[in-house]
Structures are given as C-alpha cells and as structure tokens.
Amino acid sequence: MVNALPYLALLPAAGFCYQYFATKQDEKNYPPPGDLIDVGGYQLHLQCQGKPQPGIPTVIVETGIWDSCQSWKLIQSEIAATTRICTYDRAGYGWSEQSTCPRTFEHMVQELKLALEKKGIHPPFIFVGHSLGGAIIRYYQSQYPNEVVGMIFVDAILTTETPTVFSRTFRVVSQAFSFLAHFGILRLLFKFAPPISANPQWTSTMQKAYTACHQAKVKTFSTCLKEWDGYETSFSDLRRNARSLKDIPVTIISRDPAKPMRPGMSKEAARKERSDLEKMNQDTLESLPHARFIVAEGSSHLVQVDRPDVVIDEIRRMANRAMI
C-alpha cells in the first residue's frame, strides 16, 4: 500500500509556488494603469483621468475596506469625460505597496494628501467615499476643511462611533483568508466564483482584472487585518476631530434595503446589520437636514458596480453645484 502522507505534505508547497508564480504573471499581464507615487518609502497607486475644467472641483474617490480602485472603472471613465477624477489604492491594496505605518485614518489621509500634492492635484475637491471610505473622507475633511467643497457617501459609514460590523467574526474570517491566500486557495476560489456584480456593464474582462490585481493578492488580506487593528484608534481620532458637515453639500446614497451587505448573508443577519447601520447613522442624518438621500434600487453594497449610473449622476450634479 502506498503511503500518501509524503505526497500530501507537498500540497502546501505546490500551492505556495502556484500563488507566487501566478502573482508574478499577473504583474506582467496587468501593469498599474496609474502612477506609483512615493509617500515615504513605499508607493501609492494613484490614477487620475480627465482634464481639470475651470471652476469645477476635482473628484477624489476613497474606497472601502478590502477594495481597489478597480471597482470604480465604470464610473471613472464617465466622469473623466467632463472633469478630472482621481481614484487610488490605499497602501497594501491593488497596486499600492504595503506601508510600515499603522493603518489608521491619520496615516491614510496623510498618504493620500502627499500623493495628490506630488501629482500636482490641488483643491477644491469633491470627495466620494464608499463604505469605510465614508469615515476616511470625514477625517480628511476634519483636517483640511477648506479643501472640501462637497461630499458623497456611497453606502458609507457616516458615524464617528466604531461600527459593530467590525466584529471578532470579521477578524477571524480575514485571518483565515489571509492564511489561505498564501497557498493559492483563494485565487482558485475567486477564479470560479460568481462575478462581484450581475450588472452586464461589469464584464468578465473587468472581473478577471479585479481578481488578479486585488482579490487574489496575499497582501490584500494582511492589509485588511492591519486596518481592522487600527479601527479603535481611527474612530477615536475621528470623534475627537470631526467637523460639522452642515456648511457643505452632502449626498447619501444607500444600497437597496432589500439587498444584503455581503453575498451569502442570512436574512436575519442582513436584517440585524441593516438595523445596526441605520442606528449608527441616525444622529448624522438628523443633523444634516440639507443632505440629499438617494436609494440605489436593485443595488447591493457595491453601488459603484451595481448602479454606477446613480453615482455618476450625483457626482455630476454636485460638481455643477460646486462650481467656483
């Protein structure tokens, strides 16, 4: 009888080699579409498109946790036709290198500001923040209020309180993904998994690029964990420094309330999470009677992929309103 143990022991090594060489191939097949800018010993990937137009602010996009600027492709190309729009990968995501600094809002904002300055992108800005990006753009506005002339929150965190969605379960799942990614297991799963959106505009080519340039990378999950570790500090800093949003245009775009936050969630879990998010944002909503509130019907949490038309229309509306 053949002893299978020695062969089983080779599986982790084979998986590690598969992940390593597949990642190297992805780097050749998918070079960064934007610029790699040094922000203190590591590089951020910043992609700006469109020509600045007289009197129209530049649009800056901040992604959510475990996301890349790739998920904004459907929106960026449209907005670039009328004004300049910049998307980027936070340190450790997409094409950006990992940072040695703690993953807190303070460091994220300073990295973004330095990258914009080095690229020659100057205010005024309209900020668009998705998910966790909503809290990050609030922190930017708290530090540089004179640079921000409008804010759009896309199914985003508006609260200054540490959200309950960042639970221990979230951390355990992220740790498991981080471990599995080293051996190519997640790469294989994502290869055969359904696309992140049923929107026909989100093509198989886009999905393949999104997987290769973001989902399948080991650093994506380790970065997610580092951001998780920084949440207490980040939201504590935000509570201490947050400024009022009463004096600038604000739009809140929500996913369809019938859609879950993440695929695979049970109805009960989705209902509880939706209730928690509504409670967290209630104080902010009540304090902003001037804010526009839009529901992206049929959209999941990834509004920018499921219903890019809603986000595009609102960016254009706010850009015209904020003309200087």
Image (cartoon, rainbow, N blue to C red):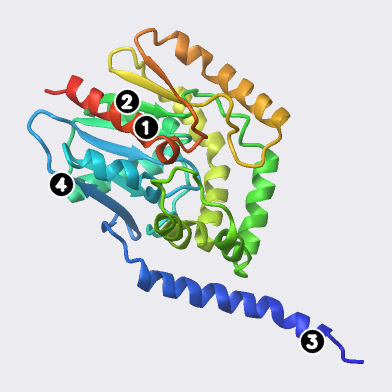
Q: Amino acid at mark 3?
A: Pro
- Spatial CA distance of label 1 from label 3 is 52 Å
- According to the picture, the residue beneath numbered tag 1 turns out to be 137
SS of the residue under disc 2: strand
Q: Amino acid at mark 4?
A: Gly
Residue 166 in sight from this viewpoint:
yes
- According to the picture, the residue beneath numbered tag 3 turns out to be 6
- Spatial CA distance of label 2 from label 3 is 58 Å
Which of discs 1 and 3 lies nearer the camera? The answer is 3
Check whether the beta carbons of the residues at disc 1 and disc 2 lie within 8 A of each other.
yes
Residue 205: percent from left, percent from top: 40, 59
- According to the picture, the residue beneath numbered tag 2 turns out to be 151
- Spatial CA distance of label 1 from label 4 is 20 Å
Toward the viewer: 176 or 118?
Answer: 176
**Mark 4 or 3, nearer chain start:** 3
Q: Amino acid at mark 2?
A: Met
Q: In the drawing, does residue 286 fall left or right of residue 149?
A: right
Q: Residues within 10 Å of mark 1 (few under 14, many from 20)?
A: many
